[in-house]
Image (tube, rainbow, N blue to C red):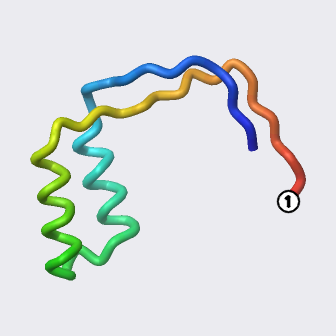
Amino acid sequence: MSVAGRTTLEPDGAYDLAKRLAARYWDLDDPARAEELAAMLEMDLLRVVIHPETVARYPA
């Protein structure tokens, strides 16, 4: 897949996104992962939003 377009940095939603992705892909019962997420949530996070102008899909 190829996506072309402009991007923006958005301050809203980054913390919720980090929490959702961590819960989905990490075992947050693992103290190391829980600590890593807590450290991320203490940072100034931004979301990179892609505003696609063209999208190309290629066969697998």
In x, y percent, where is residue 33? 23, 72
Kind of element beneath mark 1 = loop
Vertical placement of residue 11 versus 29, above or below = above
Identify residue type, mark 1: Ala
Quadrant occupied by the C terminus: bottom right
| Residue found at the very far right of the displayed protein | 59
Residue at the spot 69% in from the left edge and 18% down from the top edge: 53
| Residue found at the very far bottom of the displayed protein | 30
Number of numbered discs overlaid on the protein picture: 1
In x, y percent, where is residue 35? 13, 68
Vertical placement of residue 48 versus 8, above or below = below
Residue at the spot 53% in from the left edge and 27% down from the top edge: 50
Image quadrant in which you'd find residue 56: top right
Vertical placement of residue 28 versus 38, above or below = below
Mark 1 surroundings: few (<14), some (14-19) or many (≥20) residues within 10 A: few
Quadrant occupied by the N terminus: top right
Q: Which residue is mark 1?
A: 60
Image quadrant in which you'd find residue 16: top left
Task: Give left or right: position of 58 versus 6.
Answer: right
Residue at the spot 43% in from the left edge and 20% down from the top edge: 8
Task: Give left or right: position of 21 versus 5.
Answer: left
Task: Give left or right: position of 3 versus 34.
Answer: right
Image quadrant in which you'd find residue 32: bottom left
Task: Give left or right: position of 30 versus 10.
Answer: left
In x, y percent, where is residue 13? 28, 34
